[in-house]
Amino acid sequence: MANPNSDGQVGLGIIGVGGFGAGMAEKIHQSEKLRLLACYDISAEMAEKAAEKYGCVAASSLEELVSQAEIEGVVVVTPNFAHREHVVAAARAGKHVFVDKPIANEIEDAYAMIDACGEAGVFLAVGHNFRRFGSQRKLKELIDEGVPGTIVAVEANFSHAGGMGLTPQQWRYYADKAPALPLIQLGVHCADTLQHVVGPIAEVSSFMGHAAIPADNLDVTATLLRFENGTIGYLGSNYATPAVHYVNIYGTKANLYSGFGSQLRVLRSDRTEEVIHGPNVDDRLEELEDFGECIRMGKRPEVDGEVGIRNLAVVLAALKSSQEGRPVKLEELLAR
């Protein structure tokens, strides 16, 4: 696609400017490489406010936004269950698409999005920004260098109390709109990081329950993982406690402990400890600028639809395992 912006910035549109979408619009605005040309939100008032703040057009409909010739890529930051409609509309209009995690709520929807982008000759990027934390980048670097030796086990957890304030007016309140609530909203980030640094997850066994939140939805999950390379792991996520985030790797030569930010702790087999810092990264800005670079350079997104659907499969396989009381292989869900 030719660059219609004379200043060289990549022209973007955004669908969804409330909540997390507002922060993504701000990151686009901050970037010297990107330019926000139009926004659309189901709330016309929100769209108008964003348009005034960022000097862009407030589209009155989804069709109006995706039809604008100057827009080269569309950023979708809407509820999970709406992703398919918005991604497919953008793809059919010839726009490259960035969709925030999770790629969708259902495997069928994720495949439909991937297929629509493939048929239109555009790419699909998925917003798993946690792998971009400095600590997670350093984690992968150390693993690739062999620092932990043979990886014996892994464990990860991303939780916070976001579920405690849910009301019936919010889509996350409902299990059909946010299945396996904490795992699909939070823990899916850890699923992405673990598969990125260790390898594909093959099978899961999970327990899920409702302990504290006001919504009639799950709020606590505990999932055992078996990776294709034989590594065993644990992934926890809840929506009712003070915030926690860690990804830990246990190896024969060293243990690696990582979390938010750039810091990573190494505990070696000789009992010496070392704190290592990865790069300081604005993870959301980086993933959006990477999206712009993919448009300009024609390169493949780091987190594409195939990566996104495998992360989703971890969540849905865990939910199926909890419901049916048995281990579930990801291929059960991923097979077309």
Image (tube, rainbow, N blue to C red):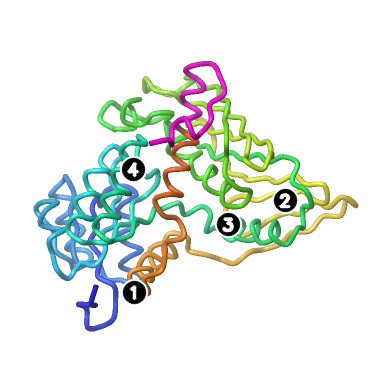
| Marks 1,2: beta carbons within 8 A | no
Disc on the earlier residue, 3 or 1: 3
What residue is rendered at 30% in x and 39% in y? 109
- Residue 317 percent coordinates (x, y): 48, 30
- The residue at which mark 2 appears reads as 256
Mark 3 and mark 2: Cα distance apart in space: 15 Å
Toward the viewer: 66 or 220? 66
Q: Which mark is residue 261?
A: 3
- Residue 216 percent coordinates (x, y): 37, 20
Disc on the earlier residue, 3 or 2: 2
Q: Relative to 222, is 46 above or below? A: below
- The residue at which mark 1 appears reads as 296
| Marks 4,1: beta carbons within 8 A | no
- Residue 199 percent coordinates (x, y): 60, 48
What residue span does the magenta drawing correspond to? 316-336
- Residue 17 percent coordinates (x, y): 25, 52
Left or right, 308 with respect to 49, comes to right
| Marks 2,4: beta carbons within 8 A | no
Q: Is residue 323 magenta?
A: yes
Please name the amino acid that badge 2 sits on. Answer: Leu
Residue closest to the far right: 270
Mark 4 lies on a secondary structure that is helix
Mark 2 and mark 4: Cα distance apart in space: 35 Å
Q: Which mark is residue 111?
A: 4
Please name the amino acid that badge 4 sits on. Answer: Tyr
